[in-house]
């Protein structure tokens, strides 16, 4: 074999081997994507770990936290962390985890204090996520820990002491160990028919339609849908003096008149508002459902 | 409104328009019965008769729609279901959550066939509402314990080889309202936090290869870009197995409700880990223990301890016909139907009982039987009018048999909230109605 021929065969062999290899085996094989700069990562990297990794510089006291909590958190979570309506309860429930109705709060259930800092910073206050400066997150975290009797009233939270806040339920969790049931899949005479008893039936009221089919008491589109069709245009923006949706102050006096009065005004029209907001095809019940939606929006905050 | 009765397509269009203004709960009646109440006036009988399931549309007569022309192409550039099916919608249970921004809605399982859930009927779960994201402004950041942190655009993600799977997506709180006892008298509410779709995207393992994962890495944090910035720690093992970075659902771009433009999808695992509106993946060596994996999505046992990182949705099943929404109207032959699924793989068999679990009959599996997907089963059956306790019980390819409620409560107590996959009982009454019940 001549030298040039052997070189040719080596080249062919190598090309064949290379072509047969996986498309890529090293970092960045496709070459797709743009390198993330340190600055870009810093802007988005918000996560905190139980060991405190990720905490930014800053600090906040229980005292500062009390004011901020009252202003930004208490309307949903209650002044003492007791929860308003169905918004989460933050404090209490110690020793209740084995009770018939366990109360899973930060103090009774959460294993790590870092989770609280991370969550407040990540998602709170509910309507204005990520609006809190870091020092305010430290202060509110400190105050909520205080509400749970986990720190003293002179406590100041810093990046250095968050990981050392002792959570009562820190050892209360175990990794998934399922399956934890073993059904043998019996096919015949699996139990005594006489032993079958009804243990429970639904207590939640459901309506029945004309075909006798159980239907839920409310569809997602009930009052809200009617509102969107017939009311939103004026009430969302406060057109022509219409009280704005969700404006508790503007609605307070009206709601004080009672739901019946609001419904009858909405049906008959009031001031510059035409009967049924100009949507005469709506039934009285439809209008009432939209009024309920407006009341709910004005009172839920 | 309807000052003059019309006929033909014009009437149907008009009716459809009017129907869209009517409370959806009443729309079906409206269309079926043609009771048009407009501005207090009742429309003409002649008009109404064109809408009703009228005798003159039945054999031997030619129906109205056979004697005229229908609407043309592009009347609906994006097609919608028949207005006659407008009660097949997602519904919510208002008392479950404080508001509709952080809330859940349920898929109407009773009215669906096959295994694919139409995109518009996939159950919703939001923690801060649906964000409106312009895809041009979308970026996915992949960083942490990697050789080369990268940022991807949608175009970038679509340049990688794509993978398509059919998998269920289930909230681990599905049926959670039933832990303490039967509560909800509708299949939609007892089991509707599940859907099954075709999902298309790039395997997370492909992206991890691209950035080069460092040897000490063990976990990945997935984080959303919505106001909740929902975050979950996912073991690297899963990420390298079948986690998918999804941009399409049932053949079209992801729906906003499902995470448009990009979500992570973890087949067979609790839905909460499949973070929507995904903005960031960070590689690390320990879990982060954020709110959704400590305060929430942990399973409190009777002894006060709680199971964490309980990712897999274990084997489950439910009868979808008959059920409270679909009662029996007469005695005779029926094909009972239901859905079974397991996060561990394929469904191997399903058994059905009519006597509350005393005796069981093996059902047949219908159509596609795919791993980690809804699987439809059925059983030919003659109803003689007797009351019955109807149950179904799935077995998956790992050998796991769906437990009874007693077995589940024996193992976990009553306070777990999540992962309720017990055998479900429908009580069939002599009049053909069906209610939810729990029996011993």
Image (cartoon, coloured by chain):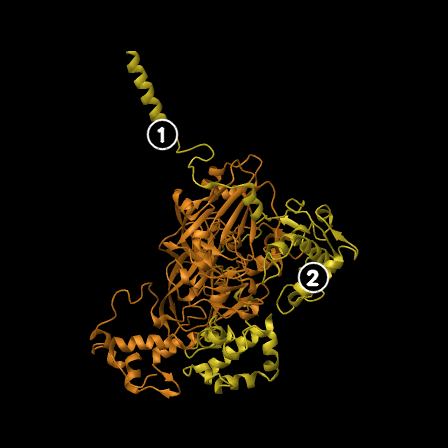
Chain colours: A yellow, B orange
Residue B346 seen from this side? no
Q: Are marks 2 and 1 on the same chain?
A: yes
* Residue at numbered disc 1: A20
Q: Provide residue A292's location: percent of width, then percent of height.
A: 54, 78
Local secondary structure at mark 2: helix
Q: Is residue A239 left or right of residue A3?
A: right
Placement of A14 over or under A29, stated as above or below: above
In front: A40, or A257?
Answer: A40
Question: In this rendering, which labeled residue sits more in front, label 2 or label 1?
Answer: 2
**Chain containing the residue with disc 1:** A
Residue B203 in which image quadrant: top left
* Residue at numbered disc 2: A68
Q: Residues within 10 Å of mark 1 (few under 14, many from 20)?
A: few
Placement of A38 over or under A119, stated as above or below: above
Q: Provide residue A212's location: percent of width, then percent of height.
A: 43, 77
In front: A61, or B240?
Answer: A61
Local secondary structure at mark 1: helix
**Mark 2 or mark 1: whose residue is earlier in sequence:** 1
Q: Is residue A155 left or right of residue A34?
A: right
Disc 2/disc 1 C-alpha distance (Å): 64 Å
Look at 42% across and 83% down and name the residue there.
A280
Residue B228 seen from this side? yes
């Amino acid at each position: 074999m001549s030298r040039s021929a052997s070189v040719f065969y080596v080249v062919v062999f190598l090309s064949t081997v290379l072509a047969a290899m996986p498309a890529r085996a090293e970092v960045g094989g496709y070459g797709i994507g743009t390198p993330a700069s340190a600055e870009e990562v810093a802007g988005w990297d918000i996560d905190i770990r139980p060991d405190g990794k990720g905490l930014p510089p800053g600090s906040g006291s229980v005292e500062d936290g009390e004011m901020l909590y009252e202003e930004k958190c208490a309307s949903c979570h209650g002044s003492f962390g007791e929860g308003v309506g169905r918004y989460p309860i933050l404090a209490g429930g110690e020793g209740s985890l084995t009770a018939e109705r366990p109360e899973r709060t930060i103090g009774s259930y959460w294993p790590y204090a870092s989770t609280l800092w991370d969550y407040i910073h990540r998602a709170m206050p509910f309507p204005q996520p990520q609006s809190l400066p870091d020092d305010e997150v430290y202060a509110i975290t400190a105050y909520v820990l205080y509400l749970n009797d986990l720190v003293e009233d002179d406590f100041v939270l810093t990046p250095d002491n968050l990981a050392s806040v002792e959570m009562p339920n820190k050892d209360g969790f175990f990794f998934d160990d399922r399956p934890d049931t073993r059904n043998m899949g019996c096919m015949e005479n699996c139990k005594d028919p006489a032993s079958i008893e009804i243990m429970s039936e639904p207590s939640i009221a459901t309506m029945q339609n004309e075909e006798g089919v159980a239907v839920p008491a409310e569809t997602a589109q009930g009052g809200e849908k009617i509102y969107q069709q017939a009311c939103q245009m004026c009430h969302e923006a406060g057109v022509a003096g219409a009280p704005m949706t969700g404006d508790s102050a503007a609605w307070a006096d009206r709601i004080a008149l009672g739901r019946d009065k609001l419904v009858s005004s909405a049906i008959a029209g009031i001031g510059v508002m035409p009967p049924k907001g100009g949507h005469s095809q709506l039934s009285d019940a439809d209008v009432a459902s939209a009024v309920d939606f407006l009341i709910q929006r004005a009172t839920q905050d | 409104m309807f000052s003059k009765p019309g006929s033909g397509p014009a009437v149907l269009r008009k009716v459809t328009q009017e129907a869209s203004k009517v409370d959806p709960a009443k729309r079906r009646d409206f269309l079926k019965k043609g009771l048009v109440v407009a501005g207090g006036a009742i429309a003409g009988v002649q008009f109404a008769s064109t809408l009703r399931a009228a005798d003159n549309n039945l054999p031997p007569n030619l129906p109205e729609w056979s004697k005229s022309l229908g609407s043309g192409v592009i009347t609906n550039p994006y097609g919608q279901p028949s207005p006659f099916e407008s009660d097949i919608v997602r519904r919510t249970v208002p008392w479950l959550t404080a508001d509709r921004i952080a809330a859940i809605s349920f898929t109407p399982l009773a009215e669906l066939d096959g295994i694919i859930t139409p995109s518009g009927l996939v159950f919703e779960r939001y923690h801060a509402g649906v964000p409106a994201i312009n895809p041009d402004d979308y970026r996915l950041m992949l960083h942490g314990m990697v050789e080369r942190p990268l940022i991807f655009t949608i175009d970038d993600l679509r340049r990688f080889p794509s993978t398509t799977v059919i998998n269920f997506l289930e909230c681990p709180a599905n049926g959670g309202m039933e832990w303490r006892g039967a509560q909800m008298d509708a299949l939609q509410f007892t089991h509707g936090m599940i859907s099954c779709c075709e999902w298309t995207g790039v395997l997370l393992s492909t992206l991890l290869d691209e950035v080069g994962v460092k040897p000490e890495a063990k976990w990945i944090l997935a984080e959303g870009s919505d106001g909740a910035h929902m975050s979950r720690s996912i073991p690297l093992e899963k990420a390298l197995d079948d986690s998918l970075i999804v941009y399409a659902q049932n053949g079209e771009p992801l729906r906003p409700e499902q995470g448009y433009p990009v979500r992570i999808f973890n087949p067979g695992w609790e839905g909460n880990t499949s973070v929507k509106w995904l903005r960031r993946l960070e590689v690390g060596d320990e879990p982060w223990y954020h709110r959704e994996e400590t305060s929430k999505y942990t399973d409190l046992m009777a002894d006060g301890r709680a199971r964490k990182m309980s990712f897999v949705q274990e084997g489950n099943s439910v009868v979808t016909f008959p059920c409270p929404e679909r009662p029996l109207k007469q005695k005779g032959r029926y094909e009972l139907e239901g859905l079974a699924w397991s996060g561990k793989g394929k469904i191997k068999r399903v058994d059905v009982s009519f006597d509350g679990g005393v005796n069981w009959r093996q059902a047949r599996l219908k159509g596609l039987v795919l791993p980690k997907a809804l699987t439809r089963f059925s059983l030919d059956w003659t109803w003689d009018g007797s009351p019955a306790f109807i149950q179904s019980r799935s077995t998956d390819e790992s050998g796991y048999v769906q437990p009874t409620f007693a077995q589940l409560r024996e193992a976990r107590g009553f306070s777990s909230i999540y992962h309720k996959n017990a055998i479900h009982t429908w009580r069939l009454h002599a009049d053909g109605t069906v209610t939810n019940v729990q029996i011993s």
